[in-house]
Image: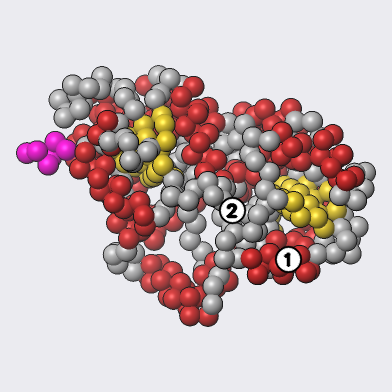
Amino acid sequence: MSKEDQQKPFVFPLGVSFQSDGDVGKDSDDASRSDSSHRSDSRRPGTIRRVFVAGRLDAFSAAGGGEIQMDETCRALDRLGEDARRWRPWEDRLGSGDVLHLFGSLKEFLPAVESARRSGAAVCISTIAWFSLHDPLRVGGPMRRLAATARFTLRRIAPRIDSWRRRLYHLADRLLPNSQAEAEQLVRHFQVPRDKIHVVPNAADPRLAMSDPEPFRRLLVQLDLNPLMPVVLCPARIEPRKNQLALIRSLSDTGVSLVLIGDPVAGHESYADRCEAAAGENVRFLPRIPHDDPLLGSALAAASCLALCSWFETPGLAAIEAAMTGTPLVLPTAGCAREYFGPLARYVKPDRISQIRDAVFEAISGGSCDELATIARETFCWENAAEVTRTAYLAALGQADRRVDTTEL
């Protein structure tokens, strides 16, 4: 990638890129020039020796979009010639790598971040976060909801107040949110300096566009559903935030088939029971389909519409995957989905049952969208995400080198 390309922020084709007060390209150049740093004997200027990636400890016991983002980013970086691998803390010394890239915003990351800083490694965090009053109001018992709401309100009115999340974000050398909207939240709620933020788009595999719908259509027959009737797909872990119950209620007695793919999140089994109790004859539940299973691509290609009526999406890996097949999208107004898909998707408020129903029928009647598929395949692929990520690494290395140089003075 040329120096000129490195200096260009990522631009969403249907939205806007995050413009920082600093200059990401400048930081990348600083990293290239930093031949007097403590790591110059093992890393050539402008290069990255090794990247360690890590997620939450139980990442793959209930894998979701964040875990897929971590693994696919790692693979795409490898295809670009970078040595990126999962961090194994019982074997890998952080000092043997240049960058520690964490996926998610978790308290358990703090010790690793502090250790990485002491070793001189750069720390990047894909925040994968969204802050909304709706979530605290709808998760857990009354006391837990009250406490979560109080924390959210306090964070909005007093962003300087210390918290583990604020410390985590300020210790990182670069934060890599998936959207402009998420970046703005980091600034507003935690006063993260804008020049520490580098927007990296979420992505999917363009090969999904070539998926064969027939295997899923045959499965519909086995499930006693008419494959010739419209099929709405909702691939998501079953939990209150994903709001499957509202989607089920919106399509009851409509004649439209609804297939929900995903496992209940631990602790939310009672919500899954409520969903099953509300489901009519037009609804089917399938367990999570592994991300590399061709049946998932077949389901996306066969669907008449993909509906994620969550309380928010950031924007949701499933939405990008469906977009690559041209499948019409119904997505929540909250979050950053509009930044990715602009006018090429339909947006709903999660508590408006009739609005969800109307949007689904509009999406079905509109049919497949070639423009959506083209934009998704050309823009939101893992190779593009990896290129932007690599630029962020170089900026983070420049920051880490300056941090260590200052410490040594």
Q: Report the residue marked by disc 1.
A: 275
Q: Up-down: is 375 above or below 258?
A: above
The answer to whether 102 appears left or right of 382 in the picture is: left
- Does the image show residue 160? yes
The amino acid type, in three-letter code, at marker 2 is Glu
- Please identify the dominant SS of the magenta region: helix
The answer to whether 69 appears left or right of 350 in the picture is: left
**Foreground of the two, 162 or 220:** 220
The answer to whether 143 appears left or right of 244 in the picture is: left
Q: Residue at x 68, y 58 (%)?
A: 309
Quadrant the N terminus occupies:
top left
Q: What span is in magenta?
A: 404-409
Q: Up-down: is 104 above or below 79?
A: below
Q: Looking at the image, what colour scheme do you see?
A: secondary structure
Q: Report the residue marked by disc 2.
A: 313
Secondary element type, mark 1? helix
Secondary element type, mark 2? loop
For discs 2 and 1, the disc positioned in front in the rendered view? 1
- Is residue 166 one of those drawn in magenta? no
* Percent position of residue 45, x then y: 25, 21
- Is residue 407 one of those drawn in magenta? yes
Residue that sits furthest to the left in the current view: 409
- Does the image show residue 384? no
The amino acid type, in three-letter code, at marker 1 is Cys
**Foreground of the two, 307 or 348:** 307
Question: Label 1 near label 2: C-beta < 8 Å?
Answer: no
Q: Residue at x 55, y 70 (%)?
A: 139
Q: Up-down: is 140 above or below 317?
A: below
* Percent position of residue 348, x then y: 69, 59
Q: Up-down: is 206 above or below 278?
A: above
Q: CA distance from mark 2 to mark 1?
A: 20 Å
